[in-house]
Image (cartoon, rainbow, N blue to C red):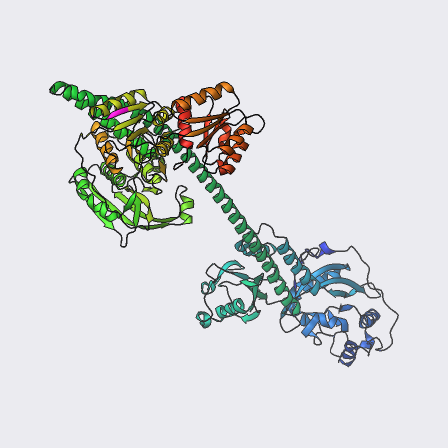
Amino acid sequence: MTVLPPSMPGTTVPLSDPSAAETSSHSAVPAAAAWSGTDFLTPDTECGRLLQAMNWRDSPLGPPEHWPEALKSTVGLLLTSRSQICLFWGDELIAFYNDAYRAAIGENHPSALGRPAREGWAALWESLEPLLRDVQRTGRTYDRQAMLFRQHRRGFLEDTFFDVSYNPVRTRDGRVEGVFCIVVDQTRRVLDERRLVILRDLSLRAGIETAADAARAFVSVLTEKRGPDVPYALVYLQNRQGRFRLEATHGGTPDPAVIDIPAEAEAAHDPRLLAIARVAATGAVETLQAGFLLDPPPIANRLTVILPLIAGHDVVGVLVMAKNRHIAVDADARRFSELVAGQLSALLSTARVLAEERHRAQALEQQVAAALAEREIAEARLRQAQKMEAIGKLTGGVAHDFNNLLQVIGGNLHLLSRDVAGMPRAERRIANALAGVARGAKLSSQLLAFSRRQPLEPKVVRVERLIAGMDDMFRRSLGEAIEIETRIGAGLWSTMIDPAQLENALLNLAINARDAMDGRGRLSIDASNAILDESYCQRHGDATPGQYVDVSVTDCGHGMSRDIIEQVFEPFFSTKPEGKGTGLGLSMVYGFVHQSGGHIRIDSAPGHGTTIHLFLPRTLEDEQPLLEPEHTPALAGGSETILVAEDNEGVRDTVVSMLVELGYRVLKAKDAASAMNVLESGVRIDLLFTDVVMPGEMRGPELAARARERIPGLAVLFTSGYTEDALLHGGRLDDGIDLLSKPYTTEALARKLRQVLNNRGQTTGEADPVRRRLRVLLVEDDVLIRDTSAELLISHGHVVAQASNAETAIDLLQRDRFDVLATDLGLPGIGGASLARAALETDPGIGLVFATGDTGFEAELTGPFADAILLGKPYDEPALLAAIRRAARPGR
């Protein structure tokens, strides 16, 4: 039995200084009453019977009956005690102990009984003898708690812990002959407390965020406590690939062969790997006689226990724990191993929960960040769209006014050119001026294209044929130093597009590409089918999901940065040197593609060239042949009558002069209302030439519609420098609309007029406005207005019956038949609207004219009043006559 330094609190006094544990007591075990013979050797105890049966003749003590009374009484006392007591007597320190002490001495019983202590306690004699001799020499009592004794008592050298009290035993003469030892076995308590400290510290370990943190925390606790209960340990964790790998080690250097745990079949050659793989697969606990370290601690046993580490319902790791060779592997030790694994599993579960929470938090943060980013992108797109829209409106308005100025200048120059015919110097100057007008017209056209206000004439186009037809144009425009490569995808779809504008857009892109390559390099033109899905359109806010023909132009030039790409479509923005470009080419392409219902995208990076994609909407309609324009003599005029409606005085005068030069009879009006007065006057008119955008409530399209109501078959030609969507629907001209864009030349005007007149079947003398004598019932309570209006109507040949109120009018309606009822709305008694309903009941075919100063009544012109004419007060003669004629039903 070996005495080792105490390892628990309260037992830190080294054996080399026994006086430190001194109780300062000189008392001795008192002597009992004298014993007779050997009665003190109690026969009803095992140790008593063994002592009686011994041969004491050779013992230094001699026969028991001759032992000193102090020895007899002390032996008798300990044999009958239930406490663990041992007595060492005499110079030889002969050992006596009772039955309760047998467990303390273990396998040295019974050989140590009655024998010198150096035999029974040989393993610890070097430490124990000085302590016993000191008690004999000084007569002082020494106490120790949880004193470690490493002794053989269960077949191995075991760590045991005892509370001990060494007391002197005196003879009658006062000499200390014996040492009376009272011990309490604290082995179980010491081990439990020591293990609880480890478990408690594991449970209190904070800052666990990952599984690796949990493994390191476990090792840290073992290292801090230096607990002999776990000589060494290895923690394996499952990685993302599902394999188990050593994460942390306590107690030494791991064998490299056990760091990575392969699949079970691969691990079969090494029992250690195989055991870990089985535990990971089954979750069952295994024990193994094998070492895992290159330098295991001396106290480590080869017996290891392998336990699963479980988080939730999953085995997420494996714990390998070595056993202390000096501590029994009993149920408590196994329970301790399981509790350690449980605590480590709890740490791993905490780490797993935290990881899941972090993942959810990160996912939420990512969602929030994505939403914010998407919102920022959407806001940026909205700002960009608003900016582009504002610029578009500005450029469109500028183009409108600019086109009017160009029309005045260009028209007068064309007229002047005839006056200076034969004067070379003057002709040259006029030609230069006209060239400037042409450049201005091109600039204006580009501005209109960007603002999406240019009139488009879309047709079903096969893009591959259009690109092939442009081959010569590309080569002439780009030069021989540019290598052109065209790639067309199989089964290319058709698109609905304005072919002339598409050619212009591709030529612009090709020229920009040439300039980006400094006039030398490879240009690729590709066409393929493309489907833009919801995901793509979310990333590109101006795109709409659907099927498209993707026409792209790629160069190997300088490329563009993101900042430049964001500005490149803005009018007048250019990366070219000053004087090398207007900055309107890409703006025109941008406006044209968007006006056509498409989408444009730029892929570029500095030093990596540029690709510009035009996504043109697919159409399922059949291809329409691209007809060559009809060739008309350059200045073919005519003798028809043309009504010019133009609000700009300069433009109006110039156009009138041009038309007169062409031989036409010309009438003019400064706005739509004036034009209607002319139309209602009955003058013969063959063609209405009207501006689209004019001041007042009525614009060009409304004027044309009303004109054709009065003169069926009337030819109409629109002109505008800025359509402002008046003639456009979906970016396209309405069917049957003829438009001559400002500015235009005399030749262009002459050709367009003949084309429109010929297409409409208009020939000289064919105009036949409807003129009839009408029977009119005029109802007005104001006598002056009634008499004046009746006189005007009669002067134009109409038959007029008058009434001052609805009652009189109803009586007239029942007695006579009228073509038109013209009534004031605000009649006394029965109002004008009620009178009109009564008239329709009597004669459903009668025409209705409502005279009123309330313009809001126009909203009531529905249902039975849908065909009624509203005549606003005050009205003049042309307005009255026009209203009466428009209200009259044909065929009456």
Report the front residue among 667 and 671. Answer: 667
Residue drawn 61% across and 52% down? Answer: 205
Q: Residue 47 in the image: x percent, y percent? A: 77, 76
Quarter holding the C terminus?
top left
Residue drawn 46% across and 60% down? Answer: 241
User: Magenta span covers which residues?
Assistant: 662-666
* Location of residue 865 with respect to 135 vertically, above or below: above
Q: Residue 516 in the image: x percent, y percent? A: 25, 37
* Location of residue 564 with respect to 59 vertically, above or below: above
Q: Quadrant of residue 595?
A: top left
Q: Residue 702 in the image: x percent, y percent? A: 38, 32
Is residue 704 rendered to the left or right of residue 503?
right
Q: Is residue 741 magenta?
A: no
Instruction: Inspect this view and state whether residue 156 appears.
Output: yes
Number of labels in the image equals: 0
Quarter holding the N terminus?
bottom right
Residue drawn 63% across and 53% down? Answer: 204
* Location of residue 873 with respect to 847 vertically, above or below: above
**Which residue ends up furthest to the right in the rendered image?**
33
* Location of residue 79 with respect to 488 vertically, above or below: below
Report the front residue among 882 and 275. Answer: 882
Is residue 179 rendered to the left or right of residue 648?
right
Magenta segment, prevailing SS (helix, strand or loop):
loop
Report the front residue among 31 and 731. Answer: 731
Instruction: Inspect this view and state whether residue 6 appears.
Output: no
Q: Quadrant of residue 349?
A: bottom right
